[in-house]
Amino acid sequence: MLVRLYPLVALTICWSIAQEPLPNCRYDDVATAHQSYQDWAITLLDTIYAVDPSYMPPDLVSVSEIGLTGDFRLRQVLLADLEALMAAAASAGHPLAIQSAFRSYDYQQRTFQYWVDRDGYEYALRSSARAGHSEHQLGTAIDFRSQDGPAPWDVSDWALTPAGGWMAEHAWQYGFVMSYPKDREQDTCYIYEPWHYRYVGKSTAKDIKQRETTLRAWLWTRQ
């Protein structure tokens, strides 16, 4: 009898876990569920969940491999789609450049401290990830900018520029999702960042777009 009941109990527990709502934004340091390098598409990083300080993808390569300039590294897995995206944007008359790509744990510590020094700790928590919590550490997140433009955060709303608007409309077709869209801070836990995109693959990006959900909410259902 116990043997026959056990699968039902397990199923009930799994269903209960799957139905847990998206956690409210808080600042914690919980190891994210999927830390394997092969789990890059479903690794949830936010203000709660983090990867280990030693997390560094083994397949990081220079963007110069696809003809881009700048001292940036990204995971090999996204280069083909990134190359196609950059070419399509240029063909549309809205050439892009990379502002930031992979960041190590130590690099992100310095980045977060920069924003603390500039804007204060409370605002920095909303606008920058603490070390270990940054999608940039995955090697699949990119801050884009207009090719000959300033840093995108120095523009009032980069999504209203020709290049930023093109990205907002077409990035999903190449597997990239805007991590922190406008008016969704309650879900994403970060302020609007129209320049920050994470590569999750074409099928996942399409699913997120069709559901009109946020990347964080989508990832939560996969934990």
Image (tube, helix red, strand yellow):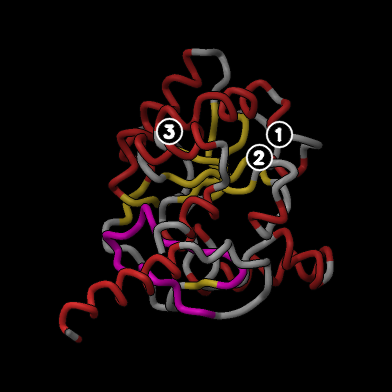
Q: Where is residue 3? Give x, y as percent.
A: 16, 83
Q: Callout 1: 10 Å neighbours few (<14), some, many (20+)?
A: many
Residue at x 75% of width, y 44% of height: 183
Displayed quadrant of residue 200 = top left
Q: Nearer the viewer, residue 172 or 186?
A: 186
Provide the residue designation for mark 3.
Answer: 206
Tag of residue 172: none
Read off the residue under disc 2.
194
Q: Amino acid at mark 1?
A: Trp
Q: Which quadrant is the C terminus positioned in? A: bottom left
What type is the residue that disc 3 sits on? Lys
Q: Name the quadrant containing residue 143.
A: top right
In the displayed structure image, the side of residue 128 where residue 42 appears, left or right? left
The dominant secondary structure in magenta is loop
Q: Residues within 10 Å of mark 3 (few under 14, many from 20)?
A: some
Q: Tell me which segment is drawn in magenta.
A: 30-48
Q: Circle 3 — which element?
A: helix
| Label annotation for residue 158 | 1
